[in-house]
Amino acid sequence: MKWGGGGYVTGLVFHPTVANLVYARTDIGGAYRWNQATSSWTPITDGVGFGAVESRFHGVESIALDPNDDQRVYMAAGMYTADGNGRIYISSNRGDTWTHYDLPFALGGNNPGRAMGERMMVDPNKPSTLFYGSRQAGLWKSADAGHTWVQVTALSSVTMNADQVKAAGGSGMGIETVVFDTNRTGSGTATQTIYVAIAPDYVSAAGLASNLYKSTDGGASWAAVTTPVSGYHIPHVVRAADGMFYVAFTKGSGPGAEGPARLYKFDGSTWTLLDSNDAAGYGGLSVSGTGAATRIALGVTNTWGNFSGQKIIQLSDDAGRNWREIAAAMPHTPADGSFWGWPDDVEINPANRDHILYVHGGGVWETRNASSSTPSWNEAIDGIEETAVLSLATPPAGATYAVINSSGDVGTWVHTNLATKPTLTPATSWSNGFAADMAWSDPQYMTAIGAVLGNNTSYGVWSGDGGKTWAKFATYAPGAATNTNQEASIAVTGRNKAIWAPGNSVPSYTTDNGATWVPTDLPAINTVFPRAYHLAADRKNPNKVYAYDSGGHWWGTAGKVYVSTDGGHTFTLSQGSVAAGLAPNYFANTSLAVNPNAEGELWLADGNTVYHSTDSGATWAKLSNFASIFAGNQWAQVQGASIVALGKAKAGAPYSAAVYVVGVINGVWGVYRSDDAGATWTRFNDDAHQFGGIGMMAGDWNTYGRIYVSGIGRGLLYSN
């Protein structure tokens, strides 16, 4: 479904000789390839190799292309260094399919400094040779096209220890980029002169003498290069065709690195200062041409706002002697889109010097008339969907909208058209939407909860006209102000009536549209991990409300269900849920759903399997189909049943709803559907549609077979 961008594109990589062949890497949403014919991006990390157990590989740290073979792509993936070692993915068909190999070092595609690089480079003369600048373990080399790797101990054999990594901010920056000093390709002889830029943390840990090192023997030995400033990061180094190097130095690592910052050119022996900034950092850097007419595009980071005199993208057409601003105060479409702050990668199209692209926190901007005195910019984001959906809610059939989408960073949106970007929103700015619900008998009344990220304050809002206009609740539920994590829920029983469960809090109810909130009698919950009740209102009898405590974590207390018969004011523990032995699990790995066509009919996923109740939660039947995958630990490697959702029934089906489960049957993870109340199940997705796992799911009540799902950092998708 359209939203457009919505997340940080951390790098753009052009093939040097094939026009318009460019790849985009993102921090949480995988990678994309540009489709020139449709002027849109094609996702290339949705299928095999990116299932539920592989969700962390949707964080892409580096992409490398073979200049001799435009079909060959290398991608290094791993979202956080704390998750362990990463993977390298290799494709011989531009990313349509992949094989992968384990790397012997950790990657951090969503860690700080994620737009620096590229960390991985293919030797243009001997493309079976690759070098990789790791965050914590120095420089690595592969001599067999990425299959195996060895540390380049001639530079350093040091792997940063835990204390060094902690002192460096928790992830390490390490070797920030690799550059081959050559104009040649395909000679068959390895390139001999190589430069590597080294972050201050690894310089200190390894006892090195400089932030820049050079090898003249293909990496067999290394010598320090004296730099004009020390203790800075070097986010990008670019070699022009005439052999001149352009090197950005910046004090911070980014995203949006703070200053001071310097830009130099370097001819192998002499450094010449081209530009400096003490108030902001330098991020993206790209060059085109040679000599005195070299075009340089420079991203100025951590500058916020659009006004005359602002610096966002600086352009020089005379090798850095003179500069002009080409983004701030220039025409942008859409005009209301932000386009500043994080331009940490800038690329001049090697086939068209007037085509310049740069990244930011919400996607990619491009101009195709950079030489104009007033370049015009457009969002080059069609096909990129990187919002992180945190909750979904679908209304009854016939409503004026299809789904309420609560997402990270961009807040709450009401989708009325699946093919266009939504416009209905409470406009909570930079915020996380946690959850939403609507009155089933009056779906124009809806509520949404979340937190504004700029000041870490909660919000609760309501709309009485299907999301066209919104207002804040006059007061907020107790606990909402101090618990601003995404583990929270809200249930609506009728117009002006709701129960709000903030994280680590006792849920409270309102009967006056938020003018007052009264705590329920549900037991208090708290945990070292954020935890909340899953709430669900019975759609046939709004006096019934169900509250599911999942136990907080896999070693927590057993899950429990509580039932209210007075509109969510007071609750009684379901002894049947205790007898069922619900597994303890994280809030995000569990869910509760009601069948709106039958009073008291509930479905519950406890992370391991599915339970069904037909008597308002008094008793629970455990389904034997689903089971988690364990791999030598007490916690599941893949959850057996993490989400259950219901939607419109198949015509003539024996059950009044189609039931969908994200989970594992016979060792195979996927989305499964049942049309007969769980008696039989069929897999609903396939290996080409895995999206790094599925974090949220809701069923549609207008169309059988339509579900809404969120991939890991892949926005909101739907099936037909």
Image (cartoon, rainbow, N blue to C red):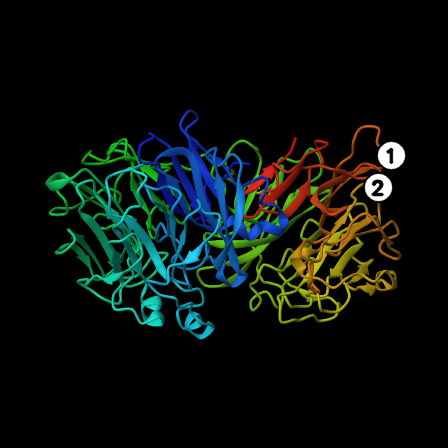
Q: Position of residue 631 (x, y in %)?
A: 69, 58
- In which quadrant of the rendered image does the C terminus lie? top right
Q: Which of marks 2 and 1 is nearer the N terminus?
A: 1
Residue occupied by mark 1: 654
Q: 47 or 161, which is in the foreground?
A: 161
In this picture, is 348 found above or below 475?
above
Q: What number of labels is visible?
A: 2
Name which residue lies at 64% across and 55% down.
513
Q: Are the residues flagged by discs 2 and 1 in contact, CB closer than 8 Å?
A: yes
Mark number displayed over residue 557: none
Mark 2: few, some, or many residues within 10 Å (few <14, many ≥20)? some
Q: Is residue 282 left or right of residue 556?
A: left
Q: Is residue 19 left or right of residue 649?
A: left
Mark 1: few, some, or many residues within 10 Å (few <14, many ≥20)? few
Q: Position of residue 446 (x, y in %)?
A: 63, 47
Q: Is mark 2 on a helix, strand or loop?
A: loop
* Residue 469 visible to an observer of this rendering: no
Whole-angstrom CA distance, mark 2 to mark 1, is 8 Å
Residue 637: image quadrant is bottom right
Q: 399 or 137, which is in the foreground?
A: 137
Residue occupied by mark 2: 677
Q: What element carries label 1?
A: loop
Q: 440 or 212, which is in the foreground?
A: 212
In this picture, is 662 found above or below 633?
above
Q: In this view, does 87 lie to the left or right of 345?
A: right
At label 2, the amino acid type is Ala
Q: Where is residue 556 in the image (x, y as percent from the top left)?
A: 72, 69
- In which quadrant of the rendered image does the N terminus lie? top right
At label 1, the amino acid type is Pro
